């Protein structure tokens, strides 16, 4: 694995040991960013099931301002720390060990809104539409935000729900990538800032 484009192009990324984490292949990663970017003019990124951190790191390399990485597994958190440093984006990264729903609640208290969200959960989890509703209700999305859901190709997510509208859904073998755009249904605060770097909880 490597960073494909941007300021950290070509930097190698470490994988999480064992078989529990399924890193996004370079081919799929390149396809994702060609659909949502390929480059960004700032913005805050949330990589919620971070794994290796490859998606969030790629977004930082391509121009995002900062990224928050969340994973509940210690091995993954350690690998994300290594990879953000190796890619030269550690100073723009926050890394938390937490499960996704607890992290959403914790992040909601900080008054931040994300321009780009990556959801690449274990394939047994097929409730990312419900989780996106939670993220939106928590006020964590900018108006016009992009959301990338990586999931089992056998599962089909709805084309539209809440403030989310599907832009594209593409299959790559057993993997599918579904991309949504978000539009706020009501006016919510969508700004904020913070300090911190690496922590055990969001």
Image (cartoon, rainbow, N blue to C red):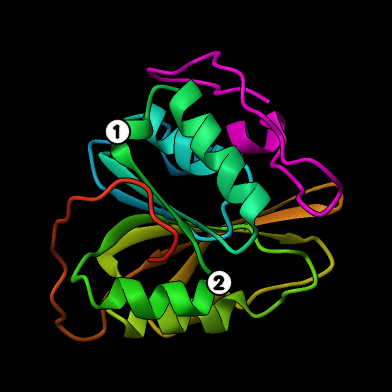
Asked whether, in this view, residue 1 is left or right of residue 33, the answer is right
Question: Split into 4 quadrants, where in the image is the N terminus?
Answer: top right
Where residue 125 appears, x then y in whole percent? 73, 74
Label 2 environment density (alpha carbons within 10 Å; few <14, some 14–19, many ≥20): some
What segment carries the magenta color?
1-30
Q: Is residue 124 magenta?
A: no
Asked if the residues shown at circle 1 and circle 2 are in contact, with their CB atoms under 8 angstroms apart, the answer is no
Residue in front for this viewpoint, 176 or 45: 45
Magenta stretch secondary structure, dominant:
loop
Task: Please report the residue visible at 63 percent of the width from the left and 49 percent of the height from the top.
Answer: 76
SS label for mark 2: loop
- Residue tagged 2: 99
Residue at the outermost top position: 10
Q: Which mark is residue 192?
A: none
Q: Which mark is residue 91?
A: 1
Where residue 37 appears, x then y in whole percent? 41, 37
Task: Please report the residue visible at 45 percent of the width from the left and 71 percent of the height from the top.
Answer: 165
Nearer the N terminus, badge 1 or badge 2?
Answer: 1
Residue 32 appears in the picture as rendered: no
Asked whether, in this view, residue 107 is left or right of residue 128, the answer is left
Instruction: Tell me the CA gap for discs 1 and 2.
Output: 23 Å
SS label for mark 1: helix
Task: Please report the residue visible at 37 percent of the width from the left and 32 percent of the height from the top.
Answer: 90
Question: Split into 4 quadrants, where in the image is the C terminus?
Answer: bottom left
Residue in front for this viewpoint, 180 or 13: 13
Where residue 116 appears, x then y in whole percent? 38, 53
């Amino acid at each position: 694995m490597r960073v494909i484009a941007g300021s950290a192009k070509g930097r190698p990324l470490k994988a999480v040991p064992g078989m529990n984490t399924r890193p996004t292949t370079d081919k799929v990663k390149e396809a994702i960013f060609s659909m949502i970017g390929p480059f960004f003019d700032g913005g805050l990124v949330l990589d919620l099931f971070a794994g290796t951190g490859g998606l969030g790191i790629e977004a930082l390399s391509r121009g995002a301002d900062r990224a928050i990485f969340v994973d509940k597994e210690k091995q993954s958190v350690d690998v994300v720390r290594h990879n953000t440093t190796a890619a030269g984006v550690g100073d723009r990264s926050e890394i938390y060990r937490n499960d996704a729903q607890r992290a959403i609640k914790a992040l909601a208290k900080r008054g931040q809104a994300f321009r780009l969200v990556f959801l690449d959960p274990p394939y047994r989890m097929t409730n990312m539409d419900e989780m996106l509703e939670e993220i939106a209700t928590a006020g964590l999305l900018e108006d016009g935000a992009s959301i990338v859901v990586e999931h089992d190709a056998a599962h089909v997510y709805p084309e539209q729900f809440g403030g989310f509208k599907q832009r594209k859904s593409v299959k790559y073998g057993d993997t599918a990538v579904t991309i949504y755009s978000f539009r706020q249904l009501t006016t919510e605060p969508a700004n904020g800032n913070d300090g911190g770097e690496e922590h055990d909880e969001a």
